[in-house]
Image (spheres, helix red, strand yellow):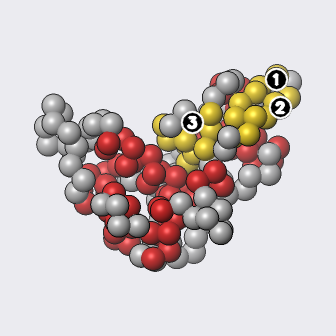
Amino acid sequence: MSHVSFKVNGTSHALDLDTRTTLLDALREHLHLTGSKKGCDHGQCGACTVMVNGRRINACLTLAVMHEGDSITTIEGLGTPDRLHPMQQAFIKHDGYQCGYCTPGQIVSAVAVLDEIKAGIPSHVSGDLNERPQLIADELRERMSGNICRCGAYSNIVEAISEVAEGKA
């Protein structure tokens, strides 16, 4: 057992966990925040995406004890049913979900993607690494490529992200 303390969605938590407990399992099983999903459990689908200190990660690939003192944001921390985050509103408006299983990870990732672009962090499709990344469909698709949607709502997801980026949501 190991002790770990971190903030999740603005609330401090202290847990005693087996050192092998993933961040995803700590969130779901110990803090009962079940929005982040366990999809593949191998970091390939993105259903477990959360933000740690503002950067998105796959929660299934990291151990909870590695996040001592970190600030973690899950889908529950972005918005509530009566006060949705603009990205959540845009996903609903553009039907950016179908079965909904991947949606929490998609939304958290999409919020982080816009922050990455704002910060000027290049991606593999950035034309010039010295220029600011452009908010174009290819850029969004590349950045969201770690989030799999088995239902195929990709074009709707890109439309939702684009709307939020343009400040229309």
Going by the numbered disc 2, the residue's amino acid type is Leu
Q: Residue at x 50, y 41 (%)?
A: 56
User: What residue is shown with label 2?
Assistant: 15
| Percent x, y of residue 103 | 54, 64
User: What residue is shown with label 1?
Assistant: 3
Mark 1 or mark 3: which comes first in sequence? Answer: 1
| Percent x, y of residue 67 | 65, 27
Mark 3 lies on a secondary structure that is strand
State the CA–CA distance, disc 1 to disc 2: 6 Å
Quarter where residue 141 is shown:
bottom left
Q: Residue at x 57, y 64 (%)?
A: 84
Q: Is residue 1 above or below residue 114?
A: above
The local crowd at label 1, few if under 14, some if 14 to 19, many if 20 or more residues have their Cα within 10 Å, is few
Q: Residue at x 31, y 44 (%)?
A: 117
Q: Is residue 38 left or right of residue 131?
A: right
Give the number of the disc on residue 52: 3
Q: Is residue 42 visible?
A: no
Mark 1 lies on a secondary structure that is strand
Q: Is residue 1 left or right of residue 83?
A: right
Mark 1 or mark 2: which comes first in sequence? Answer: 1
Q: Is residue 53 above or below residue 36?
A: above
Quarter where residue 7 is shown:
top right
Q: Is residue 145 above or below residue 155?
A: above
State the CA–CA distance, disc 3 to disc 2: 17 Å
| Percent x, y of residue 157 | 40, 66
Residue contact at pointers 3 and 2, CB within 8 angstroms: no
In what quadrant of the picture does the C terminus appear? bottom left
